Amino acid sequence: MSDPLLAVTNLETHFPLRRGILRRTVGQVRAVDGVSFSIDRQKTLGLVGESGCGKTTVGRSILRLVEPTGGSIRFDGHDVRETSGAALRALRRRMQIVFQDPYGSLNPRMTVRAILEEGLVIHQMGEAADRLERMRRALEQTGMPATTLARYPHEFSGGQRQRIAIARALVLEPEFLVLDEPISALDVSIQAQVVNLLVELREKLGLTYLFISHDLSVVEHVSDEVAVMYLGRIVERAAAAEIARAALHPYTLALFSAVPNVDPARRRRRIVLGGDVPSPSRPPAGCRFNPRCPLAETVCREIDPPAVVVDGHHVHCHLAAREIERADGNATVAAGRIAAAMQAATTVNSG
Amino acid sequence: MTQRDDMRPAPTGFWADAWSRFRRKPLAMAALLFLVGLMLVAILAPLIAGTRPVLCRYKGRIYAPCLAYFSRSLEPSIFAKDRFRGTYPTNLREKDPDSWAIWPLVFQDPYRAVRADEWPGRPENPARDEGRPSRLNLFGTDQAGVDVFAKMVHGTTIALLVGFVSMGIAGTIGLIVGALGGYFGGWVDMLTSRITEIVMCIPTLVLILAMISLLEKPTIWHTMAIIGMTGWTGIARLTRGEFLRLKNSEFVMAARAAGAGPVRIMLRHILPNALAPVLVPITFGIASAILTESSLSFLGFGPPPPTASWGSILNDARGNLSMWWLVVFPGVAIFLTVLSYNLIGEGLQEATDPRLREARK
């Protein structure tokens, strides 16, 4: 198998916390704290987690829209963190981003044409007539008429704006797209259309996606692989079907139990977690999830769990590691036991 | 997604929208019309009041001596050679019986009193408290008998220039300083913010008075420059705030993702979005610059004679308060101009501020 298009290793993005008139750094917000994953060409990695867990920062760090503080990002063999100037600009053309809020991501003072054309001008792609052709094509690909070009963003609905935002990314002919909650701000009736458009574009243009969302059912539908983030870390990563069927991490189980499901056979009892997500400026010792984990043990409070990998299923959990060992490496059996333990623990707690 | 593209009205930009909202405010529109009128008065001053013909035919050629009011060098040399000494009507008739002339609306000079029989059959301008408003001197005359209406008409240019030039300087400095501080943050912001605070502590009037005492030949341009160089702080602070707010917006991120550099982002993405709120304090700044200049002139530190300014007419009134017309007319003119700028500023604010806009829908 060829090298992955994007390989992120131990990515860290910390924001300094400054206080007082001298703006002394009094602490760090560890928004992303040691995240590793890779995405193969034409595949989609879904990144899920609660708000504030750092998934958006991961997406922005990859494009260096926020500056990572540690780790490495390799895109098609180039070290993104080591590039700058023209080389970084060239890399950014190949990696584009679609933001969550289509009302905030389009400059209200520019026509759609100016918005789409800007990247083409910066990257010196084509002459004027050719650029117009490229813009028309990008709009067509996203299902917008060519008359869109002369208009301003405020003349469009949320779904149409998001299509324009996608067209802006596509016009640069990227290989990789960071989709940062691209449907969360849209009406439910429009979400499905945009998701289908994204899937269709991926097939047609051979794109690779990092699909960031808090909507598990959508992520499951779109992604080949799913990574679950909690407090700046990825706690579990596995193939989309696998993670839905045999989640190993207690947090993933809790997350999935919250997804409404019309199929009664698949309906799970809701696992309600106690407490709140701790502040990323003071993450707990040991496993990050231990203060809220119904199954936490002493070891969880002391030792940060290392990754355990079974058949490409990564999980950071002491309990999961033990259960996998007990089940002789059979992740499905281990997952069943953990799920049962979770159900039991939360029932007792709530009873 | 609903397709209703073809039913939409013609695309409208932000400024077109703002203009259509501004147009619906009668007070702001009246103020705007008043200022446009003032600008016309400033440009057409020699056509409105003066003692030089707008156009005249003299010894077979056509001249426009009124241009001399803009610059002495524009006065055709033939009139100096023929010793007109600034008195045209009698000289024209005596020296070339075939001559004709188109005169300004009001035959009065802003720099000197009209003498007896300069215009056939007209008495000389009254001086001191005799010079109350009359048919020949609409706004009266000052101590020396110079027509106040002519002085005010020709002083309009200064009143407007003071506002535009000083706020042009202030706006440029303020936008640049604020943009740099807001966009780059860190030590740049630290530096620009402290400089802004220091400049904010400088009292403009005192600085101008100090400059006037130091300079050999202080002109109105020095005053404008100082008002501009001390008046940018509010603009800088507002611009900084807008840049801080907008630099983390998603459309700026998107532009960075597209490869845009800092200059392009600041000029193309942030500035157009930051401009509307900044225009408002600029408008108010013009009003206060006019007031500052008037105060200076009133205190006697205005432009040196013979340049006329509204404030310097007020200054004349200090010597003899019974000459009420020296207070009322320039006072009303200053008041209306400042009020107009304030109304326009307010109108702009309401037309461009999205929050106010929503509230009024």
Image (cartoon, helix red, strand yellow):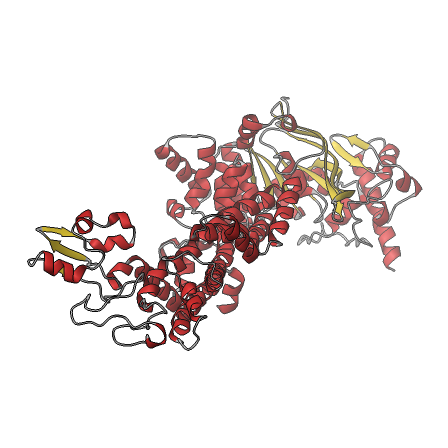
Say above or below: B53 vs A46.
Answer: below
Name the residue: 38% across, 57% down: B305
**Residue most extreme to the right:** A298
> Can residue B302 be seen from the camera position used here?
yes
Question: At which x and y percent is residue A1?
Answer: 64, 21
Say above or below: A272 vs B28.
Answer: above
Name the residue: 56% across, 25% down: A87
Question: At which x and y percent is residue B357?
Answer: 49, 64
Give the left or right position of residue A168, taking residue A100 as reference: left
Question: At which x and y percent is residue A57?
Answer: 67, 41
Quadrant of the image occupied by residue A210: top right
Question: At which x and y percent is residue B211?
Answer: 52, 50
* Along the line of sight, the residue nearer the viewer: A63 or B292: B292
**Residue most extreme to the left:** B98
Say above or below: A310 vs B173.
Answer: above
Total labels drawn: 0
> Can residue B274 be seen from the camera position used here?
no
Give the left or right position of residue A22, taking residue A318 as reference: left
* Along the line of sight, the residue nearer the viewer: B280 or B174: B174
